[in-house]
Image (spheres, helix red, strand yellow):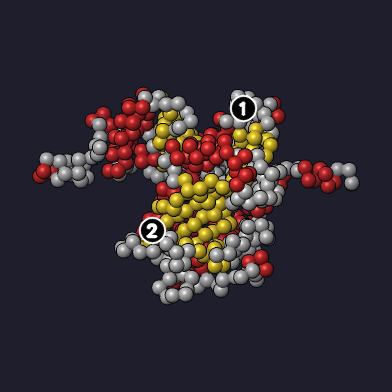
Amino acid sequence: MRSLDERPVADGGDGRRAVPMLAADRGGFIDRHQLWTDAQYAAAGQLRRVVDELGIELIRFTFADQHGVLRGKTLTREAAATALRSGVTAPSSLLLKDPSGASVFPVFAADTGVGVSGFAGAGDIVLVPDPTTFRVLPWAPRTGWVLCDLRFPDGAAVPFCTRGLLRGQLDRLAAAGYALTVGAELEFHVFAADGPTDGGFDDDQVGRPGAPGQPSGTRPLSRGAQLLHEDGLDRADEVVQLLHHGLTRLDLPLRSLELEFGPSQFEITMTAGDAAVAADQVLLARSAIRQLCRRHGYHATFMSRPAGAQTASTGWHLHQSLRELATGAAAFDPVTPGEALSSVAGHYLAGLLEHAGAAAAFATPTVNGYKRYLPFSLAPDRVAWGVDNKGAMVRAVGAGSDTGVRLENRCGEPAANPYLYIASQLVSGLDGIDRRLAPPPAVQDPYAADAPRLPASLAEALTALEADPAFTAALGAPVISWYATLKRREFARYLAHVSDWEQREYFDLI
């Protein structure tokens, strides 16, 4: 049933651009600042019907913070109606914290030092729901879920809204005549939880800003060292069934569930689609996997290299291809038989390689993720590309297939903020197209290639990001400074921590 009467006015309809809005909603924050499209108004009407028909009592209004973590508020059914008119307020200081919850900027000062106004005194930002993302949670009774964009109280866009940053780069791509298709291969670990599953914590597990508590105890679900082992996957069938049911009930385009090489290491793949939608789907899938597992006595983590999983780190392989907006044609498919890439694909690829160091700050945004860049590990260690070579940073694949040519960037970690990771690829690839960069020859032996190394640490990647003019021009100096400041504080805390390695190495010896 349509939420919108698209018949021409002459035929008794409201016209194609009619907005199905309740009278009580007119003049609200969203209407006043014209923040929704017709499709979003139509989706809001459908959302209301679903809430009524299914008896939804609670709705989670959430957004992705700078670290790709979902934050927000859960509203009652009655309060949700107001949120669909006026949005939901939250402290702006949420955007100025490191992963431990510690504020990196002076959030109560008149000038927080982020280079833009609107953050003084930890004042509010407004979460504007996107009703096209609404879902009913299959694991939480009578509960809905909707993603939000961020605005200031005067209606202006919050420049650090990562969902908005991706849309900005997709708009640049559209202006060049292209759209981006993305496919995600997302690896993660699922362990059996040792501790109580009733939500309680031991004293040493309780943390504070800047000092997270100890993690929960876990045990592996598989022995490892057996890639795609069917019996191993069957032993974890409870997890497989749990995730399949939960993710498909969320209408996420799940393609496969696989057992990877390391102990307790799994992978999901999702059907390729529009980049903005795919980013939402990755965000929701990660949160869903963690919540589903926790409710059933498991612990899922998207940390790339957790303790006990040294034999195989997890990655996020990002498949990407362009299509021409005018014709719908695949822009990466070569026109000359025998070639691996079109000229556009070559320029885009050259951009990925040219800016790999800077993009790593978004593709691998944690201290831990850089411990994955090892030779002979199915993860890259240098900036190179190959034709269907899984050791290279970028793998060109699909020539002559039904799916068409795509570039698979294998340097990302599964914890990456999906909006920033995909945006970093667009910044890099668009610069390659604009400057008509040419890629170097494909490598045959990626771990022996004479090619630049990927950054060895988060700090090294941040230095590359701050020095890269293409990223500053595309995202803006305030965004680069904000992100680098947050991440450098995270790295500084890491350096200041006395690790178990240091204790073992020096305590008895010297």
Residue reaching furthest left?
Answer: 10
Q: Is residue 386 left or right of residue 141?
A: right
Tell me whether circle 1 and circle 2 mark residues in contact (CB < 8 Å).
no
Q: Is residue 266 left or right of residue 30?
A: right
Q: Nearer the viewer, residue 414 or 30?
A: 414
Helix, strand, or loop for circle 2? strand
Q: Position of residue 367 (x, y in %)?
A: 65, 49
Residue 197 is tagged as 1
Q: Can you say whether 505 is above or below 237 in the image?
A: below
Residue 101 is tagged as none
Give the amino acid at mark 1.
Thr
Give the amino acid at mark 2.
Ala
What whole-number distance in Å separates the C-alpha atoms at marks 1 and 2? 44 Å
Q: Position of residue 294 (x, y in %)?
A: 58, 32
Within 10 Å of disc 1 (Cα), the crowding (few <14, some 14-19, many 20+) is some
Q: How many marks?
A: 2
Q: Which residue is mark 2?
A: 179
